[in-house]
Image (cartoon, rainbow, N blue to C red):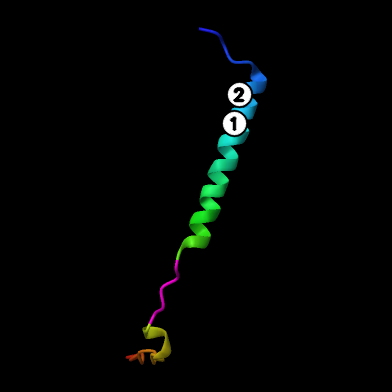
Amino acid sequence: MPQMAPLLWLNLFAFFSVVYILFLISNYFLKIPEKNQDTSKTQLPASLNWKW
């Protein structure tokens, strides 16, 4: 079986790296953000009961 030249390994690495980066970018931009309904309500912080 013939061996691959180093230049072909570099081309293969560059190709799969570009495909992987494009896959990550497409996943980042295709995600639909979810709207939280709880953000409109302001929650008061619980009062601290200091017993010193």
Q: Residue at x 58, y 39 (%)?
A: 17
Type of amino acid under label 1: Phe
Q: In this view, does 32 lie above or below 11?
A: below
Query: What kind of element bears circle 2?
Result: helix
- Mark 1 neighbour density, 10 Å: few (under 14) some (14–19) many (20 or more): few
**Residue 28 colored in magenta in the image:** no
At which x and y percent is residue 44? Answer: 39, 92
Q: Are marks 2 and 1 in contact (CB under 8 Å)?
A: yes
Please give the name of the residue rendered at 36% of the width and 92% of the height, measured from the top-left corner.
47
The location of residue 34, given as percent across then percent down, is 41, 73
Question: How many discs mark residues in the rendered view?
Answer: 2
For label 1, the residue is 13
Read off the magenta span.
32-36
As measured in the structure, the alpha-carbon distance from the residue carrying label 2 to the one carrying label 1 is 6 Å
Residue 39 occupies quadrant? bottom left
Return the residue found at the far top. 1
**Disc ID at residue 43:** none
Packing grade of label 2 (10 A; few <14, some 14-19, many >=20) is: few
Report the residue marked by disc 2: 9
Q: For the point 48% across and 61% down, which residue is it?
A: 30
Q: Is the magenta stretch mostly helix, strand or loop?
A: loop
Task: Say which element carries label 1.
Answer: helix
Is 30 situated left or right of 50 in this image? right
- Residue type at mark 2 is Trp
